[in-house]
């Protein structure tokens, strides 16, 4: 039995995948779909709950995840930008959450081990933010202490989380990860085709 972490996971899966040219959430990846890979990694980790923020083709994504113990949160304003989905997810987390993890559906390669590493670091050092890095570059997912909730909820669409990160740049705990998985996301068809999971 995994110990409770007090961390809620928010998977952002609302976009239209315009640059990919196909609906990214349901593209195949290592025997599953993108969204299933992301959700399963989160469910295998120590997070206490998984919320999937949907928008474009909500019904299709919800149907794909129907047998998994996740909460889907519809963001009707997903075209405003990613921060609108972040806010929807943050608004829906448990009242008992001490922190929330923001994960991206275009990172189906992210593992439960990485998520647990971020949670362990959060528990040990109690920073405001925890970010994985590779070769000094910041990646995802991002773990945010719930004390920053109001700042996230008031973030401007044109800035998103960047202004929160700038305001607390000295309070970010950066965790070096062993591989560049934390930097890779799949936005373009050639990126997807060039990866072993996209064959």
Image (spheres, helix red, strand yellow):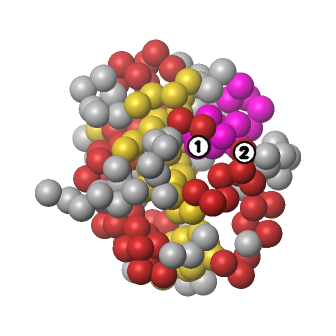
Q: Is residue 67 visible?
A: yes
Q: In the displayed image of the protein, which residue is found farthest to the left?
A: 1
Residue interval drawn in magenta: 77-90
How far apart marks 1 and 2 lie (CA) works out to: 8 Å
* Picture coordinates of residue 179, whole percent (x, y): 42, 75
Q: State the residue at coordinates (34%, 50%).
A: 48
For marks 1 and 2, the one nearer the N-term is: 1
For the residue pair 47 and 159, the one nearer the viewer reads as: 47
Q: Is residue 26 visible?
A: no
Q: Mark 2 = which residue?
A: 153
For the residue pair 180 and 86, the one nearer the viewer reads as: 86
Disc 2 element: helix
* Picture coordinates of residue 21, whole percent (x, y): 60, 32
Whether residue 95 sits left or right of residue 66 in the image: it is right
Q: State the residue at coordinates (79%, 49%).
A: 155
Magenta part, dominant SS = helix
- Magenta segment includes 89: yes
The answer to whether 69 is drawn above or below residue 59 in the figure is: below
Residue 12, which numbered label?
Answer: none
* Picture coordinates of residue 20, whole percent (x, y): 59, 38
Q: State the residue at coordinates (56%, 24%).
A: 74
Q: Disc 1 vs disc 2: Cβ atoms closer than 8 Å?
A: yes
Q: Mark 1 = which residue?
A: 90
Disc 1 element: helix
- Magenta segment includes 180: no
Question: What is the quadrant of the N terminus in the image?
Answer: bottom left
Q: State the residue at coordinates (80%, 60%).
A: 163
For the residue pair 161 and 5, the one nearer the viewer reads as: 5
């Amino acid at each position: 039995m995994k110990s409770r972490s007090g961390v809620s996971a928010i998977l952002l899966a609302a976009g239209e995948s315009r640059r990919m040219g196909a609906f990214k959430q349901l593209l195949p990846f290592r025997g599953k779909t993108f969204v299933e890979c992301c959700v399963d990694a989160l469910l295998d980790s120590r997070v206490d709950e998984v919320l999937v923020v949907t928008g474009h083709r909500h019904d299709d994504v919800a149907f794909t995840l129907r047998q998994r113990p996740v909460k889907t949160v519809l963001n009707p304003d997903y075209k405003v930008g990613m921060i609108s989905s972040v806010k929807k997810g943050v608004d829906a987390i448990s009242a008992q959450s001490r922190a929330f993890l923001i994960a991206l559906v275009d990172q189906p390669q992210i593992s439960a081990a990485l998520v647990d590493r971020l949670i362990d670091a959060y528990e040990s050092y109690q920073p405001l933010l925890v970010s994985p890095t590779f070769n000094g570059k910041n990646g995802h997912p991002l773990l945010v202490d719930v004390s920053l909730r109001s700042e996230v909820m008031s973030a401007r669409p044109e800035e998103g989380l960047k202004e929160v990160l700038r305001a607390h740049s000295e309070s970010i705990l950066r965790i070096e990860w062993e591989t560049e998985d934390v930097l890779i996301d799949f936005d373009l068809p050639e990126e997807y085709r060039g990866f072993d999971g996209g064959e």
